Image (cartoon, helix red, strand yellow):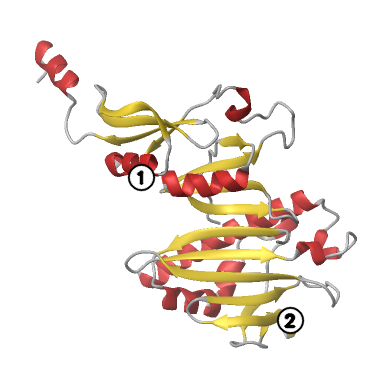
Amino acid sequence: MSQRVTVSTRVAAPPAEAFALFTGEIGAWWAAGAVRGARFHGELRFEPGVGGRLLKTVGDQAFEIGRVKGWEPPARFVFECREQGEPAGPCTEVEVRFAAAGAGATRVTLEHRGFEALPPDHPARGGLAREALLRLWGRCWTERLEQAKACVERVRR
Amino acid sequence: MTQGPSLIPGLFYDDPNAAVEWLAKAFGFELRMSYTDDAGRIGYAELELADGVVAIRQSRGHSPHDLSPRGIDTTNTAHVQVAVHDVDAHHARAEQAGARVVEPLSDKFYGLRSYAVEDCEGHRWTFESHLAGPAPEERRWRRSEGRG
């Protein structure tokens, strides 16, 4: 097992459509739930497929959040997760899973894991104790999933 | 920014991992959020049912006074009420999962059909649905008062 945050919600779209929206429109839902009071700016996009990058672009600057480690539409995708300014080396990873949940609906479960790999003074910890850090991420991802759910409903209306 | 509910009651469990699993199986709750330590033990979780959310907390996690009913002879100092779409189906599901029903399923004079039940660690819950029409007691009362 590992130190992990799990969040889950139900969205009103079948898995294939939910997968396409969560990956294709990642910037639209990621902007919610900025941690530590940081205001989100810039644009996000995936290079689809294993080995591709999750890129954040601000003006003419591009920053790699992480590499895609799993890409299995419509069931799941996995990527490394770094914040801007974090050093290379150990980082956490995020897996998003899609499971059919009744007619035209999908249960989306997001798992952010691997916090134990970060040394105590790693900038991604922000000086926080384990529980406080995980609690903050839990709230952040909850807000992001709420935002994603709203995005799915907007697109399908 | 979207927001969850503004009120989230929390319940203490000696074994939050088992509680999350049991509450899903018996009561139909779905995980909204959780986080774990190195050993995979849940430190905190939020479960949802329709638009309601309840928090699952580790007993004695932050204070020795945070107790599960299990360790104190199933003494309760709180009671959670949950509105469900079909309380008969919910009751059947809970019984099937081995939940201890402490107040049988019945129509109540105040227009609800409900039952009360203990969960895996002795927390008491009421699950209820609105009756389609007035309960027999209410019908009698309305007649006797010349209201119906």
Instruction: Report the residue at 16% width, 32% height from top.
Output: B133
Determine whether the residue tagged by mark 2 lies in a helix, strand or loop: strand
Is residue A58 something one can see in this rendering? no
Q: Position of residue A19 (x, y in %)?
A: 49, 76
- Image-based side of B81 in relation to A143, left or right: left
Q: Which residue is mark 2?
A: A64
Q: Position of residue A37 (x, y in %)?
A: 73, 56
Q: Position of residue A93 (x, y in %)?
A: 70, 71
Instruction: Report the residue at 58% width, 62% height from top.
Output: A144
Instruction: Report the residue at 31% width, 31% height from top.
Output: B114
Which residue type carries mark 2? Glu
Vertical placement of residue B63 versus B44, above or below: above
- Image-based side of A57 in relation to B117, left or right: right
From the image, which quarter does the N terminus of chain A lie in?
Answer: bottom right
Vertical placement of residue A20 versus B92, above or below: below
| Other-residue count near label 2 (Cα within 10 Å), few / some / many at <14 / 14–19 / ≥20 | some
User: Which of the two discs, 2 and 1, sits closer to the camera?
Assistant: 1
Which residue type carries mark 1? Arg
Is residue A145 something one can see in this rendering? yes
Tell me the distance, in whole angstroms, between the alpha carbons under discs 2 and 1. Answer: 48 Å
Q: Which residue is mark 1?
A: B93
